[in-house]
Image (cartoon, rainbow, N blue to C red):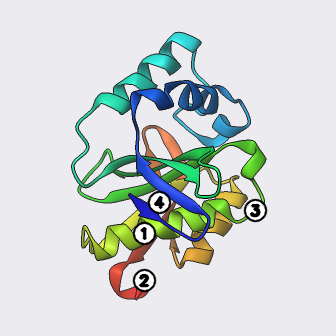
Amino acid sequence: MIESPRLRLRRQRPSDERDLIALDSDPDVMRYVGSPAGPRSPDETAERVRQRIHEEQGPLGFWVVESRGDGGFVGLCALIRMPTGDDIELAYRLARPTWGQGVATEAARALLEYAFCVVELPKVVAVTYPENRASQRVLEKLGFVPQGFVDYKGVHAAHYVITREAWK
């Protein structure tokens, strides 16, 4: 479990299925997620959520983000392997009611602390759709540096990097 002042990040469990399906079914949440972006069919969404819940994680993988105050579901964060190499990607998506409250920054900061101090990764990368300025602002607040653009699963994506040295 990973904690921050307002949040708790924990591994997914079967009881999270309903919240995760609702998150991944929200067109606004999924507007910049996936390739192509957007929600999938209800059956595909449910299958992807179940697969993520049951796959072996190791030190990487997906975490449910919940409120420390009331344990309420907030969203999902991940450290996942990039499809084209050895880099590890920071990813996140949050329920709409939490937008604009610094929750993405707080959750991502907590997961970066874990990535650099526990897993001891040398760097972490992130990708966003070029028009997703809100996510880019989160990354920049955390110290990520833009590195131009990359092809990410067929999508032209803005590419960001932060090293462990820069994090310190």
The crowd level at tag 3 (other Cα within 10 Å; few <14, some 14-19, many 20+) is few
Q: Name the residue: 62% across, 65% down.
A: 6
Q: Name the residue: 78% across, 59% down.
A: 100
Residue receiving disc 1: 112
Residue receiving disc 4: 126
Q: Amino acid at mark 2?
A: Trp
Cα separation between marks 3 and 2: 23 Å
Q: Vertically, is 129 above or below 160?
A: above
Q: In the shown orientation, is residue 39 left or right of residue 115? A: right
State the image coordinates of residue 84 (x, y, percent, origin top left): 29, 48
Element assignment for label 3: loop
In this orientation, which residue lies closer to the viewer: 143 or 23?
A: 23
Q: Amino acid at mark 1?
A: Leu
User: Disc number at residue 167?
Assistant: 2
Q: Amino acid at mark 3?
A: Gln
Residue receiving disc 3: 101
Whether tag 4 and tag 2 are in contact, CB under 8 A, the answer is no
- Mark 3 or mark 1, which is nearer the start of the sequence? 3
Which of labels 4 and 1 is toward the front?
Answer: 1
The crowd level at tag 4 (other Cα within 10 Å; few <14, some 14-19, many 20+) is many
Q: Vertically, is 75 above or below 145?
A: above
Element assignment for label 4: strand
